[in-house]
């Protein structure tokens, strides 16, 4: 594999993304919403608005009941007010699944445009006739989605940490973020789920004739993340470090299978036929 060619393809696509104001603006707005605006609104509302909704208390108590006995559970239950318990649970157990939408949606939008964008611009044919293997082409496309997505994800994590710390430190007189869940979420699960999303979307993109067609099929990747958030918000599911490790390992195996499928079923003839 010619790494110089792979990196050239990746950089070409990355420059195309950063040079397109509509695309780059969309990629920036999403982290601002999920890493700054929504967390700040949630925390400030709970802090200054009296908690009268019995469902909030039920969900919080359910999560606390499902926590394993230990230092973390003891720390939460010993907090002086129910408001502090709710804020601690939301930051460390609910917003994490919402945060996953940042790498998933951003990587989905970039990857979907990988081959379909080339087809709609009429540039895929020239790539197929270039002195480059299909494998090198796919790896370059994957890198062009993975690198900016992870930069945005880690940047969002830092912004989220700054915002939540500024708001919560005066309340708790201590740092309540990040915990083990967050570190595993950002540095273990996010890269794996980003790669999983990219492989799915590149595969869909390579076989679709239009961006709308690819978006309809590829958008299904978001549904498990939404289900994860709903499961936590209702108290039916609690994300723990063990669950994050297991999910990451399962997705890692699936990624290897997807890489095998991509290399087996995609070739110049297939890509050219999908363009025509």
Image: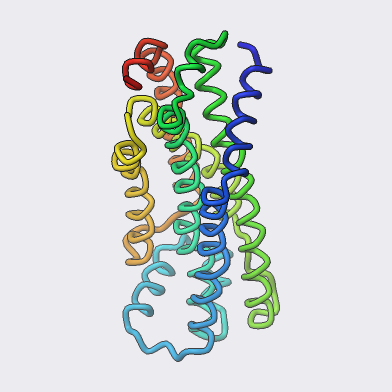
Q: Horizontal and vertical percent for residue 23?
A: 52, 48
Q: Residue drawn 36% across and 58% down?
A: 237
**94 in relation to 12, above or below:** below
List the single residue furthest toward the front. 122
Q: Nearer the viewer, residue 203 or 126?
A: 126
Instruction: Tell me the quadrant of the picture where the C terminus can be found.
Output: top left
Q: Residue 80, located in which quarter of the rendered image?
A: bottom right
The residue sitting at 34% across, 48% down in the picture is 224
x and y percentages locating residue 192 in the rendered image: 51, 37
Residue 86 position, x and y percent, is 48, 76
Residue occupying image coordinates x 58% and y 33%? 13
Residue 154 drawn above or below residue 263: below
Q: Is residue 135 above or below residue 95?
A: above
Q: Is residue 253 visible?
A: no
Q: How many marks?
A: 0
Specify how the rendered protein is coloured.
Answer: rainbow
Q: Where is the N terminus found, in terms of image quarters?
A: top right
Residue 24: % across, % down: 57, 49
Query: Which residue shows up at 63% across the image and 50% down it?
Result: 154
Q: Is residue 19 visible?
A: yes
Residue 160 in the image: above or below residue 191: below
Q: Quick check: 94 left or right of 163?
A: left
């Amino acid at each position: 594999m010619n790494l110089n060619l792979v990196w050239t393809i990746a950089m070409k696509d990355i420059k195309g993304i950063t040079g397109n104001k509509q695309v780059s603006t969309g990629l920036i707005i999403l982290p601002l919403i999920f890493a700054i605006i929504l967390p700040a609104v949630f925390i400030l509302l709970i802090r200054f608005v009296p908690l009268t909704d019995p469902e909030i208390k039920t969900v919080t108590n359910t999560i606390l009941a499902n926590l394993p006995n230990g230092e973390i559970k003891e720390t939460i239950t010993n907090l002086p007010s129910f408001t502090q318990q709710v804020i601690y649970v939301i930051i460390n157990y609910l917003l994490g699944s919402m945060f996953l939408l940042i790498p998933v949606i951003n990587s989905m939008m970039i990857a979907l445009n990988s081959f379909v964008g080339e087809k709609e611009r009429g540039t895929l044919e020239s790539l197929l006739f270039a002195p480059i293997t299909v494998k090198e082409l796919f790896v370059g496309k994957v890198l062009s989605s993975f690198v900016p997505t992870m930069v945005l994800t880690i940047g969002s994590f830092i912004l989220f940490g700054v915002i939540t710390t500024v708001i919560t430190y005066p309340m708790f007189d201590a740092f309540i973020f990040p915990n083990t869940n967050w570190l595993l979420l950002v540095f273990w699960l996010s890269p794996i789920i980003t790669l999983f999303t990219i492989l799915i979307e590149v595969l869909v993109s390579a076989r679709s004739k239009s961006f709308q067609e690819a978006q309809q099929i590829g958008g299904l990747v978001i549904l498990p993340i939404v289900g994860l958030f709903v499961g936590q918000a209702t108290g039916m599911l609690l994300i723990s470090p063990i669950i994050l490790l297991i999910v990451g390992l399962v997705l890692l195996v699936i990624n290897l299978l997807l890489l095998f499928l991509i290399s087996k079923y995609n070739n110049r003839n297939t890509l050219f036929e999908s363009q025509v």
